[in-house]
């Protein structure tokens, strides 16, 4: 009772304090880990070259950012990611819709897709390198193939999950095929399609780094971290890994929650 | 008109197709589609449009596969890969499940680990590969750790959400019926969370299977399915590559269908947590 009264009396201060506490709670584990890292790095148990201190990593990170090297690498990686993801999305949604709408296509494609999907895409990497050479083309195609499978599966499920009654009522209200597709099937299947896109993007992101290492592209975060190994530049490597983590987090938080809010949540397909 | 009528009655007169017949038919259709794909591939490979070294025919691939199975090298490659993946995955289970449960049960543990987990999760395991290579060198250790890193997060995350989503009514009911902490944990929380935990294990294994192949390409020497695929690039032996890809696909399939399928039937389906899925 008294607590409630105090909080009510100073609502602003209470909320600010609450927020501060939340920030402190989140920051605390990072501080602990950073301290342990620093102690290990300073203790000299491992060679300094292999286990740099956090200041060194931060300095390198800052230096590389100011020089424009890190942004260039990140930019190339993002372009590659988006290009291959666009390819995967186009192919995946098309195949998924075809499989969902046409019985024949489903019978033809489903066995193939089910056989190919569980094979880790990286297993094809050397094959793609032989077929398409080192560099961008192989990387693009490989990432596109790998990330198209979740998109195909989810689109297919989504199109099949559109309620029969919606189709019938749209039909009886005189919707032609085109309108049916645009106004009923597409919005109805969209939550699944978005899940597929999200999974596909996550998969593309996880694999792109490895593909960049294998395909020896000229710029790219994966290549940056892998290339740094040759010169024992552990600080560059860790700065690269940090950037990779940040890009990954930004992709998840900024891109997908936004898309979801603008489409399916607004249409009332899923609860907020 | 009359033809339609007869067909209609014809269909009606036929006994309802049994489940096995339907399943047989769907297998038949799947076989046809795979045969068509194989025929298209074979025709392309034989057409001479591409160098035979780059696009080997199916008999060549199969011959290579059997040769490698016969001389034992494929078994060794698969054995090494399995050893690495199972060890890494096992480590991930021993860390991920207990930590997930602790995070879900104790607020303090959650407050400490959740921010760390959220920060580490978006870092793809492969980006740590060069770092681990420097730290631990080429070989088993690096590969196992990459597998471990790749599979820990799905297991941890799913266990955490599974334990949190155990119906509080069940907890109260069990408590009211006099269950102590120990019983509550083993008889209510673990079975209640098990569908999530098994999903986490599935996702974790899928990721470790991808991780082991990629890590072996970069960080293994002499043995391993990923290594043999990458190594055969040097010799243009696409037949070895494709034979190994087949083995990789087969092992992945066996784990997904048999191991996790059986696990699911033995636990959550028997406990009635999820309904049996068809197929």
Image (cartoon, coloured by chain):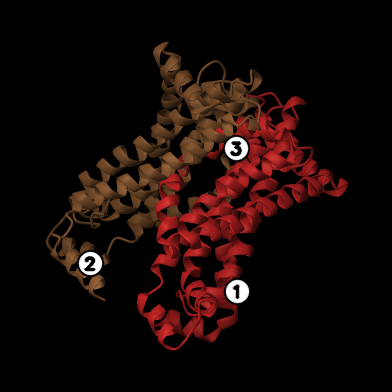
Chain colours: A red, B brown
Closest to the camera, between mark 1 and mark 2, is 2
Circle 3 residue: B126
Quarter of the figure with residue B257: top left
Element under label 1?
A: helix
The residue that disc 1 covers is: A16
CA gap between label 1 and label 2 equals 76 Å
Query: Could you tell me which residue is drawn at 15 percent across and 65 percent down?
Result: B176
Q: Which residue is mark 2?
A: B7
Q: Position of residue A66 (x, y in %)?
A: 86, 49
Residue in the image at 61% along x and 36% along y: B128
The answer to which quarter of the image holds residue B180 is bottom left
Residue B191, compared with residue B72, is above or below; it is below
Which residue reaches farthest top?
A: B71
Q: Secondary structure at mark 3?
A: helix
Chain under label 1? A
Mark 3 neighbour density, 10 Å: few (under 14) some (14–19) many (20 or more) = many
Distance between the Cα atoms at labels 1 and 3? Answer: 40 Å
Q: Quadrant of residue B2?
A: bottom left
Residue A193 in the image: above or below residue A168: above
Q: Residues within 10 Å of mark 2 (few under 14, many from 20)?
A: few
Q: Could you say where residue A112 lies in the image, as x and y percent from the top left?
A: 45, 45
Left or right placement of residue B44 versus residue A241 in this view: left
| Label pair 2/3, CB-CB below 8 angstroms | no
Residue B91 left/right relative to A207:
left
Q: From the top left corner, tell me how far across and down residue B275 is, in percent.
A: 23, 58
Which of labels 1 and 3 is toward the front?
A: 3
* 3D distance between C-alphas at marks 2 and 3: 59 Å
Image position of A176 (left or right of A59): left
């Amino acid at each position: 009772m008294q607590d409630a009264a105090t909080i009510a009396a100073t609502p602003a201060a209470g909320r600010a304090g609450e927020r501060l506490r939340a920030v402190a709670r989140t920051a605390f584990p990072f501080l602990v880990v950073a301290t342990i890292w620093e102690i290990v790095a300073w203790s000299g148990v491992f060679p300094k070259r292999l286990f740099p201190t956090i200041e060194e990593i931060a300095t390198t990170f800052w230096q590389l950012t100011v020089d424009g090297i890190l942004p260039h690498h990140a930019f190339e990686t993002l372009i590659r990611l988006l290009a291959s993801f666009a390819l995967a999305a186009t192919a995946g949604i098309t195949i998924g819709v075809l499989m969902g709408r046409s019985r024949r296509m489903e019978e033809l494609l489903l066995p193939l897709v089910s056989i190919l999907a569980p094979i880790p895409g990286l297993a094809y990497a050397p094959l793609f390198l032989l077929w398409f050479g080192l560099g961008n083309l192989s990387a693009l195609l490989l990432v596109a193939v790998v990330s198209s499978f979740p998109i195909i599966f989810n689109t297919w499920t989504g199109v099949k999950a559109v309620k029969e009654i919606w189709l019938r009522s749209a039909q009886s209200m005189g919707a032609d095929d085109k309108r049916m597709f645009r106004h009923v099937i597409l919005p109805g299947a969209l939550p699944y399609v978005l899940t597929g896109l999200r999974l596909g993007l996550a998969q593309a992101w996880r694999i792109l780094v490895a593909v960049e290492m294998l395909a020896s592209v000229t710029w790219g975060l994966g290549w940056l971290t892998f290339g740094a190994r040759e010169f024992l530049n552990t600080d560059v490597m860790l700065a690269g890994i940090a950037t990779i983590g940040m890009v990954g987090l930004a992709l998840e938080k900024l891109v997908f929650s936004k898309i979801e809010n603008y489409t399916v949540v607004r249409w009332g397909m899923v609860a907020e | 008109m009359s033809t339609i009528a007869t067909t209609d009655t014809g269909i009606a007169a036929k006994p309802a197709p049994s489940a096995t017949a339907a399943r047989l038919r769907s297998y038949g259709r799947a076989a046809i589609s795979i045969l068509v794909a194989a025929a298209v591939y074979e025709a392309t490979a034989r057409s001479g449009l591409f160098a035979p070294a780059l696009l080997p025919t199916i008999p060549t691939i199969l011959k290579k596969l059997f040769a490698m199975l016969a001389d034992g090298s494929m078994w060794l490659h698969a054995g090494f890969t399995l050893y690495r993946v199972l060890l890494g995955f096992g480590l991930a289970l021993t860390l991920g499940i207990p930590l997930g449960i602790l995070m879900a049960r104790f607020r303090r543990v959650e407050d400490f680990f959740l921010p760390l987990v959220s920060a580490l999760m978006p870092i793809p395991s492969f980006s740590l590969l060069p770092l681990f290579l420097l730290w631990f060198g080429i070989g088993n250790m690096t590969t196992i750790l990459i597998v471990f890193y790749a599979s820990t997060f799905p297991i941890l995350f799913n266990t955490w959400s599974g334990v949190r989503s155990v119906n509080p009514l069940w907890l109260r009911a069990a408590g009211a019926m006099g269950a102590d902490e120990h019983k509550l944990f083993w008889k209510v929380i673990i079975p209640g969370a098990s569908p999530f935990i098994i999903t986490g294990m599935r996702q974790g294994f899928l990721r470790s299977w991808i991780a082991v192949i990629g890590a072996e390409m970069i960080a293994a020497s002499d043995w391993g399915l990923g290594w043999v695929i990458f190594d055969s690039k040097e010799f243009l032996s696409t037949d070895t590559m494709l034979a190994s890809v087949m083995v990789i696909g087969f092992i992945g399939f066996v784990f997904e269908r048999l191991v996790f399928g059986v696990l699911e039937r033995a636990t959550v389906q028997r406990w009635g947590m999820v309904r049996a899925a068809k197929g």
